[in-house]
Amino acid sequence: MEKEKRKTIFDLIKEYFEAHQNQDIEHGPVVDFVEEQYLKLYNKKPRDTWRAIRMLYEEGWLIQVSKGIYKRIPGYNGKNFRAPFSSEIKEQIFKRDNYRCVVCSNGRHNGYEICADHIKPQAKGGTSTLENGQTLCSEHNLMKKRYGTTDFLAKYCKVMIEKSKQFKDEKVLKMFSEILEVLKKYGFKD
Ligand SMILES: [Zn+2]
């Protein structure tokens, strides 16, 4: 006996949009439909329906008409922002950043390998767009992967240096200037 495929939230959303093709759809009715069907099928409320709709847009299955309004056009297959960076977007990111790591400024000009990094990681909903991309050298790319960030401490130091200058607070100014020197020693240049 063939086991019937378990319907997912995505299947239900697609069902709704396919029944209302070429129409501008607000998320309210879709969410209501999905919740009702899901409740009938599994006797529980679905989670993150709204997020799933956005993911279908980011994958190129839906068109975003305006904020919170989506449309399905039969056969439409838009850009998938949830895939890795396309080579085209990657090149745009590198060009915008002058082919240099945004943390340490090493790059093609002095023989360093560069990579395109998702500022907001894909696992957290970051998309493969120019706005969400930055150029990193392989060292800082690895650091980002391991520690989730590259430059928060240097940024923080610079903010504190500015503030301590305002308050003419020599001690705090000296402390953060020294920390910044240590960061520079390890490759965190301005
Ligand atoms: Zn770097």
Image (tube, rainbow, N blue to C red):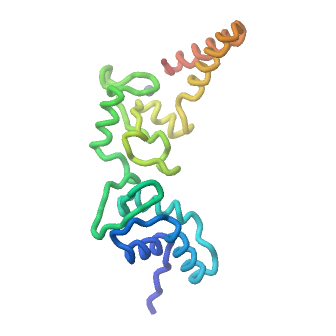
The residue at the point 41 percent across, 35 percent down is 134
Position in image of residue 175 (x %, y %):
68, 13
Q: Quadrant of residue 42?
A: bottom right
Vertical comparison of 98 with 8: above or below: above
Most foreground residue, 162 or 116: 162
Vertical comparison of 108 with 10: above or below: above
Left/right of residue 154 with respect to residue 22 in the rendered view: right
Vertical comparison of 168 with 42: above or below: above
The residue at the point 46 percent across, 26 percent down is 103
Q: Residue furthest bottom?
A: 1
Most foreground residue, 111 or 24: 24
Left/right of residue 166 with respect to residue 55 in the rendered view: right
Position in image of residue 100 (x %, y %):
36, 26
The residue at the point 41 percent across, 32 percent down is 136
Position in image of residue 166 (x %, y %):
66, 11
Q: Quadrant of residue 75?
A: bottom left
Image quarter in which the N terminus is found: bottom left
Position in image of residue 145 (x %, y %):
50, 40
Q: Quadrant of residue 73?
A: bottom left
Q: Where is ligand 1, by quadrant?
A: top left
Left/right of residue 26 with respect to residue 79 in the rendered view: right
Most foreground residue, 65 or 14: 65
The residue at the point 39 percent across, 57 percent down is 64
Total marks placed: 0
